[in-house]
Amino acid sequence: MSKKPYYITTAIAYTSGKPHIGNTYEIVLADAIARFKRKEGYDVRFQTGTDEHGQKIELKAQEAGVSPKEFVDGTAGEIKRIWDMMNTSYDKFIRTTDADHERQVQKIFKKLYEKGDIYKGHYEGMYCTPCESFFTESQLVDGKCPDCGRPCQPAKEEAYFFKMSKYADRLIEHINTHPEFIQPESRKNEMMNNFLLPGLQDLCVSRTSFSWGVTVDFDPKHVTYVWLDALTNYITGLGYDCDGENGELFQKFWPADLHLIGKDIIRFHTIYWPIFLMALDLPLPKQVFGHPWLLQGDGKMSKSKGNVIYADDLVDLFGVDAVRYFVLHEMPFENDGVITWELLVERMNSDLANTLGNLVNRTISMSNKYFGGVVTKSGVEEDVDKDLIKAACGTRDKVIQKMAGLRVADAMTEIFNLFKRCNKYIDETMPWALAKDPEKKDRLSTVLYNLVEGITMGASLLAPFMPETAERIFTQLNSSERTMEELESFGLYPSGNHVVEKPEILFARLDMKEILAKVEKMYAARQKPEESKEEEPVIDIEPKEEITFEEFGKMQFQVGEIIACEAVKKSRKLLCSQVKIGSQVKQIVSGIKAHYTPEEMVGKKVMVLVNLKPAKLAGVLSEGMLLCAENEDGELSLVVPEKEMPSGAEIC
């Protein structure tokens, strides 16, 4: 009987720089799902890779003094190294600079053009280079990109456009009739209410202002716009051929069972990508899951701060499987997760060293001490054994249920609940007390056999998430990984097997102060040497048109005091502040939610553009603008008076 195919993909990583642990989380999550599906008996195809074209890459390469291809070769190699370091079992690592991918992108573009879905026109709007996206003025938030919050520049150029509205009704119907298509549910509601139902605009799918991209072969001054290039990797990586000569992998694995992506690119995968597929007369992926972000607990990761956490840093301090455990177990299903060094050490000590490591160590040590390492099934059972057996045999179905809903953290919790039950079983049976009575030797043998069996079953379920740790447990217990079918039964461990003579420590307890000292030293090493810090870093921005003093004089700036602040509902970027300016109170909406909490805002003295024409943002009236500074990482800082100034003081 042939295995049922299962095709899972990650988003392809953008080759603008080294990925931090928040980026790395996605490949580890996908790997855990892929490994678990293989364990369930599926024929899994797991694809990942790199997105290597676009204006941002072209600019990065210029800054580095190398060609774009040299730049992406180095960055793609670094990304692949990190994916391999994290022990991920992908079947295909695709690069959008692969010749076969580029050839198919050209053919797809031409096919859609000849079909009438793509047409030539001119684009004029606001362009965000980091996001490689065009926006209309009405889509901007406080004049900034609605996705990343960075400044947008006016852009006008000849371009090809895709007729998105042609397929909008068909996509809406598909989403309504396939509730599993977009997960979690909140992501679906966001796409429907914010983009599809208000009406889709035609999408720019080519550029002429830069050259680093897949050339439109019938109009060479154009290069294919990033999303038509990047998204098609999911089919070109399977051997899709636009002329109909599709490879065996495409015929076997398409449509994809799961596109696993970050929540920030859900729009491109649930609107643009399905519509491209409809235009190509191809079936849509079965599910798109927009996972939450992994955020640093003490603030946003920033290269300028030197506090970015990379997978290398974590692996050096904790090991690969400990890092896999943390990112998989600490990420909620829908909300953002938090990573801090303190929390990492706490989880290492409580879950890995105490719950799991100590359990394996105690079991092997007692087996050696009381029976010379021989584990024997003697059959002297008591009621307490039944509870352990029930827990061990019941864990499999609980884990399968959680994984079916992609609730990976909950699945891992169920596995560790089994290990906790084994620890409780030791406390209940007290093997050290049984060992004092020669007549209870068979009972002691049963207890240790049950522990070895319970640990083997737990490790078999743990293998997709922490493969190296599971293998080390099997080696120490002289056991092997159980299949899903075998995990229905308790008692398959061969009676008479020997455990190892000396147990290996799976996870050592860590000293919090020592780890934090190493982290501080690591961050310090990233900072530039003192001699190179003579000049403060500077930022050059695109100059705007000169204005006269009279024009400047029309703007009224005053010191304001924020007396109340709250988040704007249905917006992940906006805060609504009540700002006291002299005897007046103005309501001002600002896109700074990612940089300040409402609590942090209250009490601040800020600089305010008072006479800005009122406007509604996300349905909330804004009567002015708070002044902020922005660094190269897109971080915002409110501009505040250097000295104490009263509310209403004029800024001149």
Image: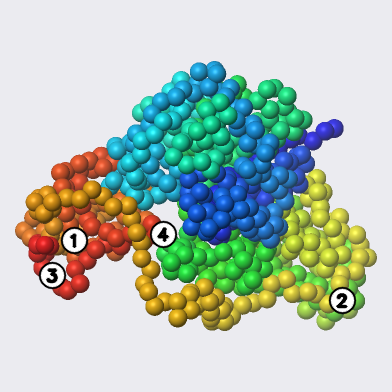
Whether 426 is drawn above or below 9: the answer is below
Front position among marks 3 and 4: 4
Q: Which residue is mark 2?
A: 501
User: How many labels were placed on the picture?
Assistant: 4
For residue 564, side relative to residue 549 (left or right): right
Q: Secondary structure at mark 4?
A: loop
Binning the other alpha carbons within 10 Å of mark 4 as few (below 14), some (14 to 19) or many (20 upward) gives: few
Residue at 60% over, 49% down: 69
**Residue at image point 63% right, 61% down:** 325
Q: Which percent across, then down, holds residue 64?
A: 52, 59
Q: Which residue is mark 4?
A: 633
Q: Which residue is under mark 3?
A: 645
Mark 3 neighbour class, 10 Å CA radius: few under 14, some 14 to 19, many 20 or more: some
Earlier sequence position, callout 3 versus callout 1: 1
Say whether residue 324 is visible: yes
Instruction: Calculate the distance from the C-alpha at mark 3 to the C-alpha at mark 4.
Output: 30 Å
At label 1, counting other C-alpha atoms closer than 10 Å, the crowd grade (few under 14, some 14-19, many 20 or more) is: many
Q: Quadrant of the N terminus?
A: top right
Above or below: residue 309 compared with residue 79: below
> Earlier along the polypeptide chain: callout 2 or callout 3?
2
Left or right of 57? Residue 156 is left
